[in-house]
Each structure stands twice: as C-alpha cells, then as structure tokens.
Image (spheres, rainbow, N blue to C red):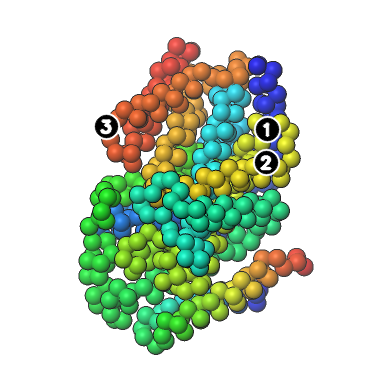
Amino acid sequence: MSSQIASLVARMDELNEFDREPVHEESLQAAKRFAGLFAGEHVAATEFVIGAFFVLHGVHAKDLLLGLLLGNFMAVLSWTFVCAPIAVRTRLTLYWYLRRIAGPGLTLIYNVANALLYCILAGAMISVAATAIGLGFGIPTPSLNDWLPNSVPWVLLTLTIGIMFTVLAVLGFEALSRFAGVCSPWMFMIFVTGAIATLPALGVHPNLDNLWEVLTTKVWNGKPVEGQEQFDFWKIACFAWFANLAMHIGLSDMALFRYAKRWSYGLFTLTGVLPGHYLAWLCSGLMVAAVDRSLDPGRMAFNAAGLAGVFCVMTAGWTTANPTIYRAGLALQSVTPNWPRWKLTLYTGLITSVLACFPVFFVRLLDYVAIYGLVLMPVGAVVMVEHWVFPMIGIPQYEAETKGMALNRKVLVVWVGTLVACYFLPLHLFYLWLPGYFIAVIAYVLLNLSRRTA
Amino acid sequence: MILLVLAIASLLFGLWSSLSFFWGSIDQKTFFNLLLAATLSYFVFATAWAYRRPK
C-alpha cells in the first residue's frame, strides 16, 4: 500500500515538475499583463445563472447593488492581502507549497477532491449550454425543483454536448484556450447589449426617467419566486465574496500571482470581478426579469439578443467547461496508471457529461459554489497560518518536509474537523466559511503549539 | 493593429445597435440582425488579430 502511494506521489510530482522551482526574477510579469489576464477571466456561463438567481431570490435593488459592491471589494482585498503576498514571497504554486506543509499524500487527496469539484462545475456549464441548444429543438429546460434528469431528450442533449466539448478538449486544449481569450470581450458585450435591449420590454422610457422605479418593482423587487428563500444584503455580499473563495482564500491563484512583481498586483483582480461579478450579474438579472423570471439561460439570451445571445450562452458554456475539464484531468493525472493526456481528458469529460444530465448542479448552482469554496477553504487557512503565524509565535515551519512525512495528520484533522464543525454550525450556508476559516486557523495553531521552540 | 481596431469597432457597433433599439430607432428584428453581424465581424477580426504571425 505504501509503495503504491509512493508511486502515485512520484507520478504527481513528475506532472508538476516544471513548476517545482520558484519563479525566477526574469520570468516576472508586468502589471498590464495581470490587468489583461483577470479582465478576461470572470465572464463565464455561470454569470447567466447567478445574476438570474438573485432576481428569483427576491433581492431588493439597493441590497444587490451595495451587497455586490461590498462582496466584490472584499474578494479583491482577499486576493491582494491573503493570496498575492504568500505567492510573491514563495514564488510557488499552492501544490508545491502545500506539499512542504501537508506532505505529498495529503496533496494527492487535495488534488483528487479538487478534480471532482471541477467536474461538477464543468457539468453545470454544460447544462447551461444545453438550455441554449435545447431551445432550437424544443427541449424544455429543467425546472427549479428538478434535481434528477427529467426527460430523455434532456439527457441525450447534455450527453451530446458534453461529448462534443470533451472531444474538442481532447483535440487541442491550447488552441481552444487561446480562442476562448478571443471570446471574452464579445461575451461581455452580449451581456451588456442584451440587458439594454430588455429595457423597453420592462417598460423603461428612452429618457430613463423611470429606470429606478422599473428596477425596484419589476426586476429586483424583493419578492422571491415560489420555493426560493429571500436573499438580503448580507447574503449577497457574502456570496460575491466567496464566489471565488477557492482562488483567493483557498490560495489556488498562487499559480498566477507567483509571477507578480509585487503583492499589490492583487488589486488587478478588480478588472475581472467588476465586469464579471458585478455588471454581468446585473445584466443577467435584467434578462431573466424580461422572461417572467423563468430560469432558462437559453431563452433569456434569445429574448434579449437573438441568435447572437444563444451563441453567447453556448460559447460561454464551452469556453468555461473546456479549461475546467482540462484542469480536472490534470488533477486526476496523478492517480491514473500512466494514462496519456488525451485518454484522461476523455474519461474526465465523460464523467462530467454524465454529471451534466443532473440538473441539481445547475439549479442549485449558488449552493454548489458555496460548498466548493467551503471544502477547499481549510487548506488555505492552514497554509496562511504556516506562512505568517508560525514564524511569529516560534513554531517551526514545514513539518511534513523536515520530518519526511507522507501525510501531515494535523492538516488532515484540521481540514476534516473544520468541515464537520461547519456542518453543525447553526448558520446559513453562505455564512459558514468565515467562522470556519477562524476555526481552521485556531485549530491548526493549537495542534502545533507543542512544537513551539521560542 | 488595424485588425484590433476593427474588432473593437465591431463590439462598439453591437453596443450601438442595442442603444438604437432601446431608443426606438430600429425594430427588434433589425437589432438582432445587426448584433449578429457585429458578432461575425468581431470574430473574424479578433481571431485574425489573435492568431497573426509575429513579424
């Protein structure tokens, strides 16, 4: 058993070999590169669903505008003050830094968990794209209460789209990723044009004199649709903050920021969250209000922007699912018996396609986003403590590395223990991660106090 | 450089078409067609720009 784990770990290290060394001075990237990188990163298929859900959850217009502002501001600060400084000081990916702290065995577990979460996310993207293509074939989109596949045509459609996306990912990920970069500005334009074009249907006058009245009575009017709980200012703010929790607090974006000259480059994430997690969410809210608050991204986009809108939903689904399938494959590569890249992408894509048949991941996307961030958050807390707190209180860093441990049990206990504690906390799912983060921080410090030397 | 300018102009054209529809200057069908045309021209110019050969 131990030799099997050693073999898996060796393979995993081999896959990440090119990232092993800290980034060299000459490879550091200029500020404008970061601004451009983030600008194209946060306009995805999920924006069609998330912004629409805020309308369905009966949020008030003022709560939404201010809540998103606060939440996105906190997210940018999290990238700037939590993720970027650790990345700039270590110049390593989370993978290699976590390996020193938690040991290769736990890094392996983290990779597999990450891959499964990626597969579900990509499945949701495929479902969103299916709503657009299904429109042309008259295949109804699952309702908000459908968790399981509700019709044979829906299953056939999602499987077909999933297989198409998978084949494209197998044929050439690099070229497709480059093309996805071309799509980003256009997708944002479709969001904005679609929103503007729905204003007449909502009754907004050309001189905009009744805009606020329409927004507060017909769009974000504080009345949730049947079966949906009402969201207030704090739920919106928390959601906007944790929408990318795995990336900032969870430290996944160390992979990007290790190339930054200064930690302050974290502020450039504003170029991504402002259009993607503010304007695009508002735009999709307007679009869903114009189709009688029915969560059907394909219909929303067609109603607002015609065929270009339908094309946008499909493209957004594909450009987001494609790298997600690829990343999931990369994360799983370490636990597969020397499979070639294409074979692994193929199997990952097929798993994702099957998951896409289940509407639960698409109609409960907000909950899934919360769970995704929550599951990976304790690992970010452990790394933060190890990096900043241990040197301050005299606890030696990198126990797993110095003692040659395959798996740092303390990290595993903190990870699992934090999730168990969060499960029992009497709080809304959206609020769990913040106390959970402090639980993880305190627990990891307490478990290591006995090693204090000073 | 000209390809990039044309790609950006296509996006602005798409945006203008939605504003024209909002102000009532064009009907919905014309707006949809103009937006589709803007989309096609954007992809032609932006793809050509992104995949251009370095000099």
Circle 3 sits on which residue?
A426
Q: Reading the chain from its start, which is encountered first: label 2 or label 1?
A: 1
Q: Reading the chain from its start, which is encountered first: label 1 or label 3?
A: 1
Return the chain for callout 1: A
> Disc 2 versus disc 1: distance between alpha carbons?
8 Å
Q: Amino acid at mark 3?
A: Pro
Q: Image quadrant of residue A289?
A: bottom left
Q: Residue A266: x and y, percent?
A: 49, 48
Q: Image quadrant of residue A298?
A: bottom left
Considering every residue shown, the one lying at the far front of the view is A152
Return the chain for callout 3: A
Q: Image quadrant of residue A333?
A: top right
Residue at disc 1, secondary structure: loop
* Circle 2/circle 1 CB separation < 8 Å: yes
Circle number at residue A344: 2
**Vertical order, A145 against A133 (above or below):** above
Mark 2 or 3: in front is: 2
Q: Residue A180: x and y, percent?
A: 60, 59
Circle 1 sits on which residue?
A336
**Vertical order, A272 against A291 (above or below):** above
Between A335 and A181, the one nearer to me in the picture: A335
Residue at disc 3, secondary structure: loop
- Horizontally, residue B34 falls left or right of residue A53, namely right
